[in-house]
């Protein structure tokens, strides 16, 4: 797999269940194990699963009439990716701040002031 892609919060919620189970799961298993306050319809879950497959995070195997989903990346690998992404985002913000702060004697107005 080339590069891990960012997941939405909803996609992460589904992946957290799949990682925790530790074996291939069906759409029905995923839906029945989501928090009750979620209220996602089957079509919504299927859409998220398709997005995760498209991002290369999940793979599906068709057996009889059901798709069985399993991760293509480990939970740890995803955590490492998210941590690296966070650090890169903070670094970009710091670089922007340093650029604005060091603009000679110009006054910098920060948001909210």
Image (cartoon, grey):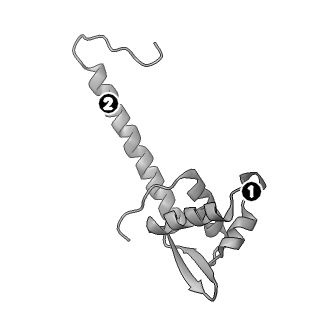
- Indicate which disc, 2 or 1, sits on the residue closer to the N terminus: 1
Residue 44, given in percent of the width and then of the height, sits at: 62, 60
Q: Does the CB distance between marks 2 and 1 fall below 8 Å?
A: no
Q: Which residue is mark 2?
A: 96
Relative vertical location of residue 89 with respect to residue 104 in this rendering, above or below? below
State which quarter of the image contains the N terminus.
bottom left
Up-down: is 15 above or below 26?
Answer: above
Q: Foreground: 5 or 97?
A: 5
Q: Residue at x 52, y 63 (%)?
A: 76
Vertical placement of 20 versus 96: above or below?
below
Quadrant housing residue 28: bottom right
Instruction: State the residue at coordinates (44%, 45%).
Output: 86
Image depth: mark 2 or mark 1 in front: 1
- Give the residue at the far bottom of this rendering: 64
Q: Residue 98, image x and y in percent?
A: 30, 26
Q: Which residue is mark 1?
A: 35
Q: Position of residue 42 (x, y in %)?
A: 67, 65
Residue 98's disc number: none
Q: State the SS at label 1.
A: loop
Query: As rendered, which of 54 and 82 lies closer to the eye?
Result: 54
Residue at the far right: name it: 36
**Residue 90 lies in quadrant:** top left
Is residue 23 found left or right of 58 in the rendered image? right
Q: Could you say which quadrant of the image residue 64 lies in?
A: bottom right
Instruction: Name the side, left or right, on which 60 lies relative to 29.
Output: left
């Amino acid at each position: 797999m080339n590069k891990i892609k960012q997941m939405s919060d909803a996609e992460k919620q589904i992946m957290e269940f799949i990682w925790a189970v530790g074996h291939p799961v069906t759409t029905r298993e995923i839906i029945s194990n989501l928090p009750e306050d979620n209220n996602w319809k089957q079509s919504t879950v299927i859409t998220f699963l398709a997005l995760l497959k498209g991002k290369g995070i999940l793979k599906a195997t068709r057996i009889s009439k059901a798709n069985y989903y399993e991760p293509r990346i480990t939970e740890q690998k995803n955590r490492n990716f998210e941590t690296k992404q966070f650090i890169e985002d903070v670094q970009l913000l710091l670089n922007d701040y340093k650029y604005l702060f060091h603009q000679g004697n110009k006054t910098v107005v920060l948001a909210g002031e």
